[in-house]
Amino acid sequence: MIDSEKTTLNKLVPWVCVALLSATPLCAAPKPNVVMILADDLGWQDLKCYDIDEPSPYDTPYLDAFAKKGVMFWQAYSPAPTCSPSRCAILSGNHPARAQKTHVVGGHPPYARSSRSRMMEPWYSGRMPEDTFTLARAMKANGYTTGHAGKWHIAINHKAFPQPEDVGFDYTRSSRGAHSNLKNRLEGFATTEIKDPYRLDANGFPYHQNNEDALTFLSENKTKPFFLYYCTWLVHSPIVTRNEALLKKYAARMGVKPQLENDKRMKGQKNPFYGAMVESLDYYLGQVLSYLDTTEDPRWPGHMLSENTYVIFASDNGGVKGYTDNTPLDQGKSSAKEGGTRVPMMIAGPGIAAGVQSDVVVNGLDFYPTILSLAGSEVPKSKNLDGCDLAPLLLGDSTDPTLVKDTDGSVRDSMMWHFPHGGDLESTLIVGDYKLIRNYDHVNNDESPELELFQLYRTENGKRVRVDIEESKNLATTMPEKTAMLNRRLTEMLTGMKASYPRYNPLNKTLPNQSAVCAVVSHEIKGNAVEFAFRENGATVIQADLIYTINGGEKYEEWFRTPATLKSNKSVSVELPVGTTHFYLNLIDENSFLVSYPAVTNYKEEFANQALSTQQTTLRAVREKVEN
């Protein structure tokens, strides 16, 4: 038996009671429960226990105490720098790049906001497919009652299909509770009045239905093994609080006066509303943790629920720059730099050593395989999982990175993010102590080099020493070979996941090769097939895609993508998927320009109104006037 196995066994002994010689157990813990808590937009530096450099002004006593009960990870990351892709990745186990779910909303044709826009985002999925074998379905298949409380957002809209009950949850509630919006954030605070729906409790905190929903699930299902996915709405915007006392506390501490409107230009952690939200998050989660600590386990008399419950706490992405300050990390939410992806993460439960601080690099993608492993549940062999099982790490030496292994048995040494959106338009890769950033909008752009390389840490005697977590010293020109090697590896990973990339806007005449883009000159619908003809003007077309919808003009209009066939005679053919109501053709040339046919002229208007329709009455070729 190797040392790591001995360590794991020794830590499990207090939990699984030893058996008599007759093999009759004196006592045995039943199947463990799992509670996964996901904060919303909570930054790496927002919890007091994560203080480095400048101290945080926010008080978080309950989560600070919880960090001492298990493993606190200093180098934990979200799957993506925004909400929806992270949540889909956690529930599906699939990397956002593989799932084609790389940002919020989605499910629309690519478009340029104006002729001045340099690039346009790729098509990406509007939601997680409803037939995904989710973590909830996997837990149900292994005898668990599954519950969801709070934010969902794995579809185009919070209320759009699929909902939690569609993908494996037995119980679901989505109240925003005390975090519902205020017409005026300087008024409408909670009171002690009996009729106040947010009536203050004995500790001066407003009644919070979101938290009560989580507690209700625990109370109603503690007689059987349960899995709770608790997604608090805190600390996402709106940046408001119903706790006047807390607002005054942080205004006084920060030396500021509460303002009616939020100023996102502020530097430092100087927003008293945000401070009140962070402490409120801590207080409400403290109630859940206290319930587990003080409620006897009906399935294991003489023991509290917390003794047989694994609790995972993390954030879905980094803090929003301007609401909070992620310093020393650069940027924040919506950026694949450290401030947008590094998050607080703590895990505690039976067999996990308490009071451990770990520098092992982990990710929210690891939750799916880890939870199943801790729960003794199996994953179908056909199920793809892009994360790693952290159980050997958690139940062994939580500071040993060699215990985190990929499915092929090799030690994980890398982690990748793909965010072809917004103003950043980037992919990033961490390998060991170094981080590569690939910027897609680099052509004739002095502000955005194609590649950047940063040394985040220096490993000395097995310890990682901080070097440049600020990502301030670009080493790409001084370490060209390493930069090129990491770039090749990033390409291999993205290619393996069939990732989608942003493309240049053919309407932007300041870009080189803009005059060489192609033009579609005609299309013809023949039954369920469409033929397009196009003209190349100097640049070779290398890819064709059909962007289509089956519910054009409806409330949650959603668009999908399927490849089209490029022919040698400068034409494209494609079979329309069953049910198609409207469609576009996208052509991509060798210079990475994307041409849409028809062109999306107004992204604020329904896309179906600007698209081709299957309801056209003529089958003859339709010639289009094309400007040269």
Image: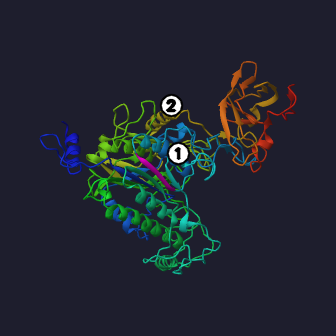
Q: Which residue is the extreme one toward the top?
A: 568
Q: Can you tell which mark lies on residue 88?
A: 1
Q: How is the image coloured?
A: rainbow
Q: Can you tell which mark lies on residue 529?
A: none
Span highlighted in magenta in the image: 144-149
Vertically, is 325 above or below 310?
A: below
| Residue 145 is covered by the magenta coloring | yes
Q: Position of residue 232 (x, y in %)?
A: 49, 59
Q: Secondary structure at mark 1?
A: helix
Q: Position of residue 332 (x, y in %)?
A: 52, 56
Between tags 1 and 2, which lies in front?
1
Amino acid carrying label 2: it is Gly
Q: Main secondary structure of the magenta part?
A: strand
Q: Residue at x 44, y 66 (%)?
A: 284
Q: Which residue is the extreme one toward the left?
A: 21
Please give the residue where the numbered disc 2 appears in the rendered image.
Answer: 496
Rounded to the nearest whole Å, what is the CA distance between mark 1 and mark 2? 19 Å
Q: Position of residue 98 (x, y in %)?
A: 53, 36
Vertically, is 388 above or below 541?
A: below
